[in-house]
Image: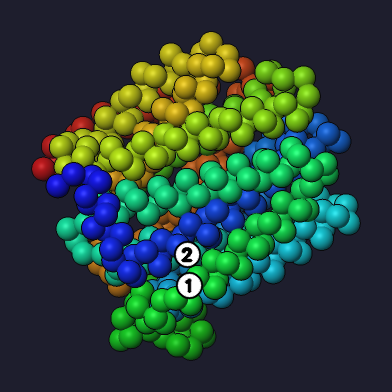
Amino acid sequence: MSVVRDLRVLLRFRDFRRLLSVRLLSQGADGVFQVALATYVVFSPEKQTSPASIASAMAVLLLPYSLVGPFAGVLLDRWQRRQVFLYGNLLRALLASCTALLIVASVPDWLFYVSALSVTAVNRFVLAGLSAALPRVVDDERLVLANSLSPTAGTLAATSGGGLAFAVRLTVGDSDAAVMLLGATLYLCAALASLLMGRELLGPERSSLQPRLGAALASTAQGLKDGLAHLAERRAATRALAAMTVMRFCYGALTVMVLMLCRYAWTERGSDGLALLGVALGISGAGFFTAAVLTPWAVGRFGPYGWMALCAGAAAVLEPALGLPFAPAPLLAAAFVLGLITQGAKIATDTVVQTTVDDAFRGRVFSLYDVLFNVAFVGAAAVAALMLPQDGRSAPLVITVAVLYTTVTVALLRGRRCFT
């Protein structure tokens, strides 16, 4: 069956379409919010940005929720996921509006970060819930295709939201607060879209629900222990998650490098650097879309481990070839390649986890997956801060990332032999 015909069939699932609409609106708002944060922290004229300051900002915004993530998973396996999408997006709309007011008020940075941190906290619940709910709206036969379309469409929505935010920021002077309010509006729309689905549609099963919050929190420790034990028994899922974590680390390190290049090396004005960063994100989004088209065929042809190994191997070769010149054109090409291989590997990883982990544990496992993403990204920013000069040109960083991609390729090829 062709990809186009499969997509047409998949989109006939009414509940899948509705869940997808929640994802698109929610992640579109995420893209707007993230660009508002980046422009306020990195490209504000009054701020002298360094790799260390970027790493610090990422740590403040992401690391505390490495602790929240496991708790989110336990609650996601007890709370109705539709309600998480409804109330989570309503809360984010309110918090994003408060963050916009703090920008207008020119408050100290620490207070701004506390408010932004609150928005990203709720994000842990929503994103993990979207992945955990997906098998409830499609059949097993089309799960790989759904994993190609849904998360990739969400990433494209985030990229589009980011592009919209860039456009607002570049055309309206001093508009960081306006961009934040745009994100708040999209969060509100995502909350309303979730009402199109039945309250119990997305699970978990009623028998596993604990309606009393105190009872759910009291069982967190045992729930985490059970979730980790369940994951440890699924070696295929564990190996895929480990590989994806390293690839996320590589992506994070290169992201910080490109931010510094756009800010200082390639342009003289902050607005020009911001525009160039927007182009890079758009090209990377094209790579995400290409991955959505290629991955169902590639997983069918090579298997999930084979496709992930091919992605990592291509990155190991192309990343230093395109990155070492530190010129805009080759690195924009690298943005496309990295978008394709990172999203392609993520789709395969999602499929491995969803098909090997029981439904009652998916919320916990996907929350742990989210934690690994955060820790890897922040760790990459910290390493980049140590290796990058002010202008972002660092051959040792590029070579280190290439070595990591090579290591992942070898490990995945070995794993492929074990699980085929």
Residue 256 in percent (x, y) is at 60, 32
- Looking at numbered disc 1 in the image, what kind of residue is underneath it? Ser
Tell me the residue at 21%/64% (across/down): 139
Tags 2 and 1 touching, CB below 8 Å? yes
Q: Is residue 371 left or right of residue 302?
A: right
In this rendering, the answer to whether 279 lies above or below 30 is above
Q: Does residue 213 show up?
A: yes
Residue 253 placement: quadrant: top right
In this rendering, the answer to whether 173 lies above or below 234 is above
In the picture, the disc for residue 22 is 2
Q: Which residue is mark 1?
A: 194
Q: Is residue 158 left or right of residue 202?
A: right
Label 2, residues with CA under 10 Å away: few <14, some 14-19, many ≥20: many
Q: Is residue 7 left or right of residue 277?
A: left
**Mark 2 or 1 closer to N-term?**
2
Give the camera-side residue of 196 and 363: 196
Tell me the residue at 23%/45% (across/down): 3
The quadrant the C terminus occupies is top left
Q: Secondary structure at mark 1?
A: helix
Tell me the residue at 52%/85% (across/down): 214
Residue 86 in percent (x, y) is at 53, 74
Give the camera-side residue of 45 and 246: 45
Q: CA distance from mark 2 to mark 1?
A: 6 Å
Give the camera-side residue of 196 and 258: 196
Residue 175 in percent (x, y) is at 79, 47
Residue 45 in percent (x, y) is at 83, 34
In the picture, the disc for residue 373 is none
